[in-house]
Every structure is written in C-alpha cells, then in structure tokens.
Amino acid sequence: MARLIFLAVLLMTAGTARAAPGLYAFDQRHGTIGFNVGHFGLFTSEGGFERFSGRLTIDPARLEDTRVEVTIDAASVAIAVPEAASMLKAPDYFDVTQHPAISFGATSVERRDDTHFHLRGQLRIRGITREQAMEIAILDRHADGSGSEVADVVASGEISRGDFGMVADRSFIEDVVRLRISMRIRFGAAVNGG
Amino acid sequence: MAVEWHPAQRWLHWATAGLVAAGFALAWVMTSVPFRQMALKFWLYQAHKSIGLLALLAVVARLMLRARLGRRATDLPPREDALAAAGHAVLYILLLAVPLLGYLTADTAPLRIPTLFLGLLPLPVVLGRDAALFGVLVTLHRVLAIGLVVLAIGHAGLALRHHAAGRGVLAAMLGRRSAL
Ligand code: HEM
Ligand code: HEM
C-alpha cells in the first residue's frame, strides 16, 4: 500500500472503486490539447489540436514505470481565424506535409504530492526532438455511477517554439508557448487491465 | 436658431469629416494587409478603431453643443432647408451607429484582440466572442460605413453647389463672415 503513489490517488476512493493497473487509451473524445501564446503584452492567442491519440500505461505498484505516449495529428491544429490556421500548417510553423505527426513520450514520472506529478519526456515537433517537462495535476477525482474511478488529468508545460525551429514572426509572437492538456480518464475501463 | 455656428461646432464638423475619411480609408488598407504582416496589421486595426472612436466622441460633443446652441439659420429656400435638416439627421444617426457597430464588431471578433484606445487604454469587452453575431455586425458596420461616406460625399457636393449659387452655408461652416 505504501507504494501506491501516483495512481493510488486515481485508482482508489474510500474503499469503493478499485483501480486496476493497466493500459488506458485516450483521444479527442476524452479531452483537449490546447496552447496559447502571448503577443508582447498586447493580447494572447489560443489554439488547439482536434485529433490525437494517447496511451497511458500505469502500474500503481511501479510508478516509475508509468508510460505516456501521445501522437497528435499536426494538420488538426485549430485556431479561430482561417489565416492563422493556414499559417500554423505552413512550413514556418508545424510544416504538416513534411511532418504530419507530433509525438510525446514520457520517460520519467516523479511525485510531488498526492495529486501533483512531474513528468519528463521527449517531445518531437517538425522532426526535432527535445526534452520536455510537464506538470501533471489530478483534479476532480471521483467514482462514477458504475463504480469506476474517473479523474481529470491536466498536464501543463511551456515549450520554446524556437527550439523546434519555429522562429518566424518573432516581433509579434512570443517564443514561449504554453500547453495545456486536459483529459478525463476512466480508470475502471482499462483496455487490457493487468 | 443661432445666427452663426459656434467655432467649436465648426471645428468639430471638420474634425468629424477628417476622422471619418481617415477611418474609412484605413479600413480598406488594414483588411488588405497580408495576415503575415501581423504587427503592421494589428496597429492599422488599432488606428482604425481609435480614429473611429475619436469620430464618435466628436459627434457626441457636437450633438451636445447643438442641443445647447442650435443649428445656424440658413439662407436656403424652406423646402431645401427642411431636406438639408433631414439629411443631416441621417448623417448624425450614421455617425453614431457606424462607430458603435464597429466597437461591437471588434468585440465579437474570433480572435480576442483588445481595442486599445489611442494605443494605450484597453476598452472593456461588452458581448465577447460570438462568430454568428460577428458575421452580421461586420457586414452591417461595413454597409453603413459605406452609406455614411456616400451620403457625406453627396452632402459635400450639395454644400459646394449652394456655395457656387452664392449662398452662405459653406462660408459659414468655414467661419468666414457671411451675409445672411
Ligand atoms: C467613422 C467610423 C468608422 C468607419 C467609417 C469605419 C469603416 C469601416 C469599413 C468600411 C470597414 C470594412 C472594411 C472591409 O471590409 O474591408 C470596417 C471594418 C471594421 N471596423 Fe470600422 N469604421 C469605423 C469605426 C470603427 C470603430 C470605432 C471600430 C472599433 C472600435 C471599428 C472596427 C472595425 C473592425 C473590427 C472591422 C472589421 C475588419 C475585418 O473584417 O477584419 N470601426 N470599418
Ligand atoms: C464625412 C464627412 C462629413 C460629415 C459626416 C458631415 C456631417 C455634417 C452634419 C451632420 C452637418 C449638420 C450640422 C448640424 O446641423 O448640426 C453638417 C453640416 C454642414 N456640412 Fe458637413 N459633413 C461632412 C463633410 C462635409 C464637407 C466635405 C463639406 C464641404 C465641402 C461639408 C459642408 C457642410 C456645411 C456647409 C454644413 C452646414 C449646413 C447648414 O448650415 O445647414 N461637410 N455636416
């Protein structure tokens, strides 16, 4: 019991729902991947990705072995103005014809407290791979009607777009882009619980 | 009716005319600047919005003065004078409606770009982002702005015609002594 850390929180509630370690799949039906970037104090633009898929492999007994893999369809980048969306798909930004996929794979998980974790991994955008840290918060954890454990997992982090070769429009778009990934994971529903 | 325009009324008339002309010209420039020239486009939009809001302020000030001081008596035949007054009323309505609709256009636009009055003062959000409403407002703002400018050109043409016919309306608006 003492080692049920990362997911004990997720996976157990006051003796009711019981969490199963296993593989959990998620995609755009379970949440959102959003980003925002500042324009030098004038205003902030927001966007997101409409198609992605991910797998979370968790064994509460071996937290350090937690795996997260996410693949994002770069061409699904979405932003309120059509000109901005085409700009983001073009070679200066995500270059979606050359690099159709964005991917992230976690390599380590570190517990901060019962609901906060520090994730490190490899982020690949435009064919460039960089080390990327994310902060994970587990919010609104509860048992749903059927007794499975449901939680909102929110991951946030900051990337430097320049690190991935996206250096255009530096006079108007800041380098630091904030990411926010929010997923509702149903931990009773492992794809192949083990 | 007043015998002469108050100098403030004259100045505000020409200021409004200048601001409307500048805001209108800028509207076409700002929308045709390519998206990738973002900083330029941003500041042209800000200039358009500030100029339009200054026009709104000038019109409000004019209407307040007019409520106190009235309209200058003209030397036009009564029927033409009544038509002119009706035309001016429509101009005033459009002068209020166009900037107000412009404000709401910016307010409901898909990208949440603030309106910085004179490049500095962020103005409050009233309705917030609303794609459907934005579509209606941007068209209404554009159509009424064109209506305003067409009417103002007609108005200027008539003023010049009266002037050519030896009447004193234009001279009075320019502040030249006129023999009424
Ligand atoms: C004298 C006052 C004004 C005039 C004559 C005027 C005129 C125009 C015209 C002709 C357009 C259409 C341009 C196009 O479709 O290419 C336009 C667009 C616009 N105006 Fe104004 N405007 C005035 C005031 C304002 C004000 C006060 C604001 C905001 C505070 C404003 C915000 C906008 C916005 C956001 C657009 C939309 C441009 C787009 O489609 O992206 N306008 N204006
Ligand atoms: C965007 C441009 C313009 C707008 C919006 C505009 C608007 C107006 C309005 C609303 C009035 C009525 C004043 C009142 O009764 O309180 C007026 C009066 C007048 N305007 Fe303009 N104006 C414009 C341009 C011009 C130009 C270019 C000329 C001259 C060539 C002109 C000449 C006059 C004259 C002579 C009067 C006085 C009419 C009278 O005594 O009844 N205006 N204008």
Image (cartoon, coloured by chain):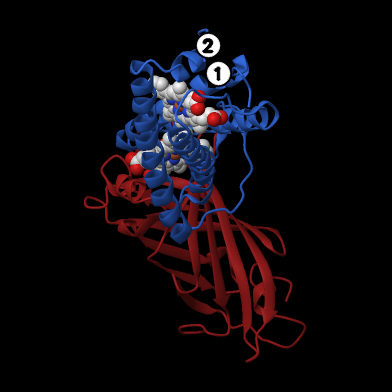
Chain colours: A red, B blue
Measuring from the top left, give residue B45's x and y in whole percent. 44, 33
- Residue appearing at x 59%, y 54% in the figure: B127
Chain letter behind tag 2: B
Measuring from the top left, give residue A23's x and y in whole percent. 48, 77
The residue that mark 2 highlights is B175
Q: Amino acid at mark 2?
A: Gly
Q: Amino acid at mark 1?
A: Arg
- Residue appearing at x 46%, y 20% in the figure: B169
Considering the image in quadrants, where does the N terminus of chain B appear? top right
- Residue appearing at x 38%, y 51% in the figure: B139
- Say if mark 2 contacts mark 1, CB within 8 Å: yes
Mark 2 is surrounded, within 10 Å at the Cα level, by few (under 14), some (14 to 19) or many (20 or more) other residues, namely some
Residues at marks 2 and 1 on the same chain: yes
Foreground residue among B118 and A78:
B118
The residue that mark 1 highlights is B10
> Judging from the image, what secondary structure is the residue with disc 1 in?
helix
Q: How far apart, in angstroms, are the residues tagged by discs 2 and 1?
A: 7 Å
In this view, which residue lies farthest toward the right?
A: A14
